[in-house]
Image (cartoon, grey):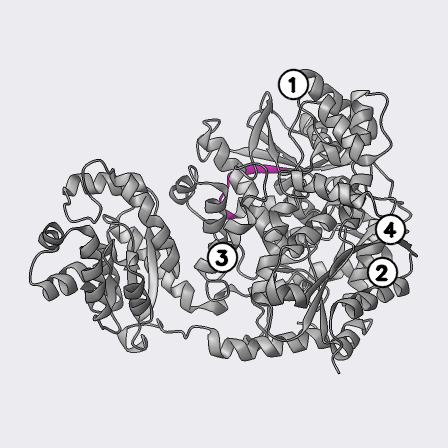
Amino acid sequence: MGLMNAGQLAVRAVRCYQTAFTTPKSWLSTKASQLGGKNILLMGPPGAGKTTVGKVVAHRLGLPAIDVDDDVLEMTWKMPVAAKLASIGGERFLEEEGRALCNFSASGCVVSLTGSNPLHAAAMRHVKESGLVVYLDVDSDDIVRRLAGMKVNRIVGQEAGVSMRDILLHRKQFYEKWVDVRVLCGEGETVEEVAEKVLKAVKRYQNHSGESYMSTRSDGGESSNQRTYFSDVVIEGLATDGGLYVPKNGFPNMDAREWRRLVDMSYPERALILLEKCIHPSEVSASDLREMIFKAYGCNFSSEKVAPVRHLMNNQYLLELFHGPTASFKDLALQLMPQLFAHCLPSVCNYLILVATSGDTGSAVLSGFNELAGAERHRTGVLVFFPEDGVSEIQKLQMTSYGEGNVRAVSVASDFDFCQRSIKRMFGGSGLTGHLAVEYGTVLSTANSINWARLLPQVVYHCSSYLDLCRDGVIKFGEPIDVCIPTGNFGNAMSAVYAKQMGVPIRRVICASNHNRIISDFITTGEYDLRGRPLMPSLSPAIDILKSSNLERFIHQVSHGDGHLVRELFSRLDAQQHFQVPEPLLSRMQQEVQAGWCSEDDCLAAVRSVHAQTGYVMDTHTAVAKVVADRLQDGSCPVVICSTAHYGKFAPAVFKALQIQNIPEDPVEQLRTLAATAAGPDIHGDMMKRLLESSRRGHTVCEAKYSVLVEEVEAMIQDSFLKVM
């Protein structure tokens, strides 16, 4: 690990102090003598197999097994549970069952709770203090079949006119409330298979150190006291040696039966299960994560499906990622990432999030962090730098609508690469981070896709698009798809690579570039060459990028974690503006991704052609991906094209493509005219409101000097935070 700057040292020191008092002890080392008096509490619906699974788990660990029905309730009441329920009715039964559980005491046992225990809050608080609650999340069809065969008559709520599915649906909210660890059970799994999953889940819970992170430029040899965890990478953003953080042990992999469980779920439900597997519960609890996710993907999206998949033509499908409040794919990450950031925030220091944007990231970051409330809102500022002539007028209005308080945007008389390079320099060896930490008690972080918490939520929508195709009968699980993504910084493409690593049958990730084509050239030749290469403005400005940050993660992955190689390549790029990867590595890269590029004329022609054939209006970035998909995809399987922004954000280009005359000068009026002229998805109402407010304001453009940007940072801190005396 490289040397930490002063701000990161302060953060790590605080977090280590907090962790000593908040992280659960490792209490499942081997057998009963190492349990430290804690129980394993199996929770789930009736028919989930809690009793039989509990016996197998107890036997494997050499622990006593307790079944609450048989060993607690019937022993207390001196009568069968079914008879008790029949004699007093469901409402009173829940109270007496809860009272009996409140008097229950055990340690070092595997306890199988009843299906109705979680409905009694006081009882669950009591037993939860004694151990770890493991939720057996079993498929409803499996449950209904099992209960029909068992002819069970002791389920609270089981009465005429109430289906078992209704009972299961009602109870799910209570199971979600109390869970510490979820065991997702695939359809038809055996008792032994479920028991094995329970053992693995409990082991994962107590082994936090198994889910550490490393820099792409590290050799992976950190000692235990140097381990970096999820909270660290969320707050720090960039690794201390200049690399990007990645999970040391890669992504978790799910089997086909688990994936099939997700097919009929909503987007937030899918996100919860996938992210639970990627974020250790000792850092973000299951209940906290659920609250964040359902807030992130709720009424702030104009589509109930959040990221719907739409058939375009032939074997091509559009993944619409623009239904969030700022109408771009960045919302899918940046409605969640600020909540994760606030959750991981240490109790000292203020934080200033620095962002360089080529258009969409800026407004999405400002929107997401603007939704924070309470102390986190006051201790967290956001400063966005954007190129004055490198974003659309709509994007500019979106960002400059946040002109007050501790979230704001600053225009720079240069391009995106200058903005991004300047921010990286601020995090590097300039001494700025130490000065800000000491002088103002403020630590710098970032919300670009170099931050792991920005990239991780994007994995979800690639998984979800595949599951939607399964749900709609386009494919069966296991059949392949291709994914085509307009990309500049490679973050969206990298998240698709990670979705494949989790088990989604993505055959190829196809990267689509505009005429700047840096990624296309690199994937084709293995040569990354910035020498004498100007950044050319385009009709798809969000991918007008020459220095693609997330390629570092991709090279790290395909080189099997060769941090030395990654460090050498990107040091050479910084010093010489050029590097060439070895031929074997290029071959492995080309097995994972394909790449192509699209001219400006072809981009406009694609918008016009698709509208003429289908009535659908694409934005220019989606058009770039459509052109490249037409050229590179062989038609043997479905291809999902990522539609990364609403067409209204790039209205002048769409007017030009559709050959619409008499275009109004005002950007807001352009949106209205286009909406009335072209059939297509509506733009988010919140975005229109902000555009109207912003159109009445002006904005200043700062000089393209590093020192000037530093002055903006200091001014932002002085305006937003109290100076540390």
Q: Which residues are magenta?
A: 502-509
Mark 1 or 4, nearer chain start: 1
Magenta span has 332?
A: no
Q: Residues within 10 Å of mark 3 (few under 14, many from 20)?
A: many
Amino acid identity at mark 4: His
| Whole-number angstrom distance, CA of label 2 to CA of label 1 | 49 Å
Of the residues tagged 3 and 4, which is closer to the observer?
4
Q: Residues within 10 Å of mark 1 (few under 14, many from 20)?
A: few
Of the residues tagged 1 and 4, which is closer to the observer?
4
Q: Residue at x 42, y 73 (%)?
A: 24
Magenta span has 508?
A: yes
In this picture, is 186 found above or below 469? below
Label 2, secondary structure: give it.
helix
Q: Residue at x 27, y 65 (%)?
A: 123
> Measured from the top left, where is residue 710 in percent x and y?
85, 66
> Would you name the residue on which mark 1 appears?
614
Mark 2 or 3, nearer chain start: 3
Give yes or no for contact between labels 1 and 4 (Cβ–Cβ under 8 Å).
Answer: no
Of the residues tagged 2 and 1, which is closer to the observer?
1
In front of the other: 547 or 670 = 670
In the displayed structure, does residue 145 sit left or right of residue 667?
A: left
Label 1, secondary structure: give it.
helix
> Would you name the residue on which mark 4 appears?
699
> Would you name the residue on which mark 2 appears?
575
